[in-house]
Image: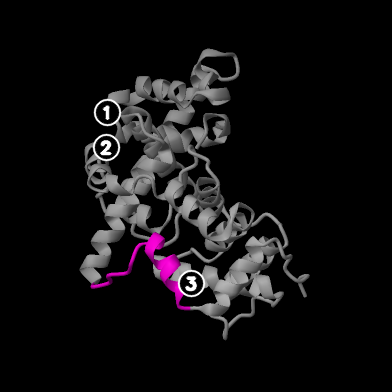
Amino acid sequence: MAAAEYRIDSVPAFGAFVYADPLLGRGFRGARRAVLVMGGAAGDLSRSSAITTTQLQQLFNQAQKKYEGFVVATGDQLPKTKRLLEMMQAGIDGKDWYAETRQELEKTFGPANARMMVKFLVATSNNKTVAANTTLALKAFARYRMGLPFEVGTTGFDTLQSQLLEKAARGQEFGGLKQKSFEANLFGDKEAVTVDTWIRRAFGFQAKTITPAQYKFMDYRLTQIARRVGMEPRQVQAAIWTVIKEAEQKNSGNTSLPFEKLLPKNIAADPEMQELIANAKAGRPAPPRP
């Protein structure tokens, strides 16, 4: 997350990060340093009249409680920074997934149409495998180019996906923290951090639903690791995502191809899709939405 996006109400979630990163220091002094690390508007809080020592102490207490809650939520398995760095290094070959995926999309669909395909990938990504996400996004692109609705059921879209796809097709904003970050990363934002099911598992959170505070905590922590190792936050996230996904797929016997291989494979097997993409790249407009 970019420094300019840090706000005062985010400080407790960020402050919890200090407990997991001993290099910032423990206790109240560490909390003050954590606020300074944030940068931007919030980064000046501890040096200005905008916040008093008493208020900072209150934020520190809130951060401590949040961290303790995170430990419980992971079954006392919240990973140390060293462990996250090990996971990042193990998946380092996947660090450029976002940049490479955008290049593949622009090569396949053309720059203008790639932006819509990105939105369709985002709209169909929630709790889906890479294979399922690719299939649904291509199906959405086909229906968009044919001017057809994103019907629930027979098309394979669920109710939420149908709603998000319709908003995407109409150029409307959609999605929560995860979807917005995913879209931003694919559009070239290097600072946003996509926290999805795989990252949740990397951090050990057991519940399938990620709370806003948990999301911010994981976002901040990966961002600071990126600063430390001289990488983009999205690269750190992509590397960890790669190793966790591959490990779980191996354990489950799922040997799905990566996106950059799935996309051309699926298109090559669908002549109608090839024609729709060719028409889109040629600049022929899609029919109006029903």
In terms of depth relative to the viewer, which is nearer, 234 or 64?
234
Q: Amino acid at mark 1?
A: Pro
**Occupied quadrant, residue 148:** bottom right
- Depth-wise, is mark 3 or mark 2 nearer the camera? 3
Residue found at x 22% / y 47%: 90
Which quadrant, please, contains the C terminus?
bottom right
14 displayed left or right of 22: right
Up-down relation of residue 72 to residue 231 (above or below): below
Local packing at callout 3 (Cα closer than 10 Å; few below 14, some 14-19, many 20+) is: some
User: Which contiguous range is marked in magenta?
Assistant: 253-269
Residue 263's label in the rendered image is: none
**Occupied quadrant, residue 143:** bottom right
> Which numbered disc flags the more N-terminal residue, 3 or 2?
2
Q: How far is disc 3 from disc 2 in space, using C-alphas? A: 41 Å
Residue found at x 67% / y 54%: 173
- Depth-wise, is mark 2 or mark 1 nearer the camera? 2
Residue found at x 51% / y 49%: 186
Task: Determine which residue is flagged by label 2.
Answer: 81
Residue 22's label in the rendered image is: 1
Q: Amino acid at mark 3?
A: Ile
Rendered location of residue 23, percent (x, y):
28, 25
Secondary structure, mark 2, is helix
Secondary structure, mark 1, is helix
Task: Determine which residue is flagged by label 3.
Answer: 267
